[in-house]
């Protein structure tokens, strides 16, 4: 089968690799669509994501959906022909974190397309992939594959909203109008946020955000004073989501979040230590919490998509065949031309 294999930064090859057969409790899927994530872009352009560096060839991809081709033994509730969104998390299900409902923090997590461990966990930008049955969530037969593949990033946003706490009637700021930031805005609105602002460095994604119902889009490169006005009276926002992975963006949030507010860190920061304005955190009693991937929120995300309660359509920019993977990655990296680019197989 064909797969998109990254050998080094900017060295992505479409290669023929061996197909695997499903074992007990597993299914084999034919991939229909795969979204290019920010982590895929970081691996592609830098050969690393945060503290995780490429040490061997890696099949990229974890935002995927497909159709079940065959099932192994001891699989119930799934059959060939079922269309599913695939949860890329493969927790051990037995460690203390898994047993207490925080499987995203699993001590032995195997996450598709990740260099966090060695040997790396191969991803799903391939014609077929084998997954555990519990990684598969059925979707309606009419749901487009690229919408089903959006369950993974939507689950990230749902988990972040859960870490934020009650959003009903809250004033929310999102740093970064990329796909995750946009999805955070959609989830926050669904959760009842009263006012949502989003920031970015370019205008094009901000226009999409406004079309999605965000109350205010702020270009902090061109008009930083528009964000600075929210610093008065010790800050305006109840909750802020940092979805850029830029230390400067995180630092700016402490000036506009009110005393007693909360900042949720989603963006993967550069390797090493990142300065935090601890005095502001302390004096304003601001909660700074992390949000890493998701656990049961994946099922929630699939349900939101299946019921049409969250519309991801506006962020789905393009879909290209895997044979044009380099072109797809270049497009996905161009913030002025795209938000979410999918590969199809």
Image (cartoon, rainbow, N blue to C red):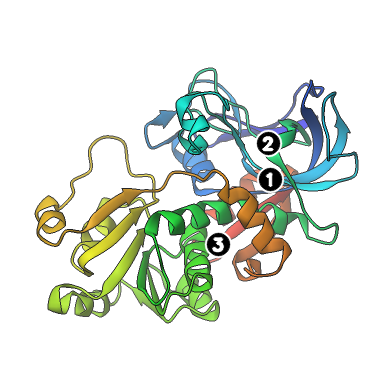
Q: Which quarter of the picture shows residue 195?
A: bottom left
Q: Secondary structure at mark 3?
A: loop
Image quarter where the C terminus lies is top right
Residue 268 in sight in this render: yes
Q: Residue 248, position in %: x, y?
A: 24, 56
* Residue occupying image coordinates x 22% and y 70%: 256
Mark found first going from the N terminus, 1 or 2: 1
- Marks 2 and 3, Cα distance to the nearest angstrom? 20 Å
Residue picked out by circle 1: 64
Tag 1–tag 2 contact (CB < 8 Å): yes
Q: Residue 5, position in %: x, y?
A: 64, 31
* Residue occupying image coordinates x 36% and y 74%: 170
Residue picked out by circle 3: 339
Give neighbour class at mark 2: few <14, some 14-19, many 20+ (Cα, 10 Å): many
Tag 1–tag 3 contact (CB < 8 Å): no
Label number found at residue 124:
2
Q: Which quarter of the picture shows residue 168?
A: bottom left
* Residue occupying image coordinates x 64% and y 63%: 316
């Amino acid at each position: 089968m064909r797969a998109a294999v990254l050998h080094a930064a900017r060295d992505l090859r479409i290669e023929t690799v061996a197909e695997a057969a499903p074992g007990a409790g597993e299914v084999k899927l034919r991939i229909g669509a795969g979204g290019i994530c920010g982590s895929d872009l970081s691996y592609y352009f830098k050969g690393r994501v945060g503290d995780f560096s490429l040490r061997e060839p890696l099949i990229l991809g974890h935002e995927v959906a497909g159709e079940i081709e065959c099932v192994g033994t001891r699989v119930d509730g799934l059959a060939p022909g079922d269309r599913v969104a695939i949860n890329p998390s493969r927790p051990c299900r037995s460690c203390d974190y898994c047993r207490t409902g925080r499987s995203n923090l699993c001590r032995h997590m195997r996450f598709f397309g990740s260099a966090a461990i060695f040997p790396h966990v191969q991803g799903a930008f391939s014609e077929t992939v084998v997954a555990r049955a519990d990684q598969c969530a059925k979707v309606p037969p009419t749901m487009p594959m690229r919408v089903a593949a959006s369950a993974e990033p939507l689950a990230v946003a749902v988990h972040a909203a859960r870490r934020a706490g009650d959003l009903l009637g809250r004033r929310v700021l999102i740093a970064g109008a990329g796909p995750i930031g946009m999805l955070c805005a959609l989830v926050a609105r669904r959760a009842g946020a009263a006012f949502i602002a989003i920031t970015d460095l370019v205008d094009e994604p901000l226009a999409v955000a406004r079309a999605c119902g965000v109350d205010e889009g702020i270009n902090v490169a061109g008009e930083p004073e528009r964000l600075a006005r929210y610093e008065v009276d010790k800050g305006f926002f109840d909750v802020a989501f940092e979805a850029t992975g830029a230390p400067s963006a995180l630092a700016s949030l402490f000036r506009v979040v009110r005393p007693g507010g909360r900042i949720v860190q989603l963006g993967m920061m550069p390797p090493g230590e990142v300065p935090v304005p601890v005095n502001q955190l302390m004096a304003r009693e601001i909660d700074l919490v992390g949000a890493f991937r998701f656990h049961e929120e994946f099922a929630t995300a699939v349900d939101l998509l299946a019921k049409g309660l969250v519309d991801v359509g506006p962020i789905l920019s393009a879909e290209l065949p895997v044979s044009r993977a380099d072109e797809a990655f270049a497009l996905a990296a161009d913030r002025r031309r795209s938000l979410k680019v999918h590969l199809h197989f």
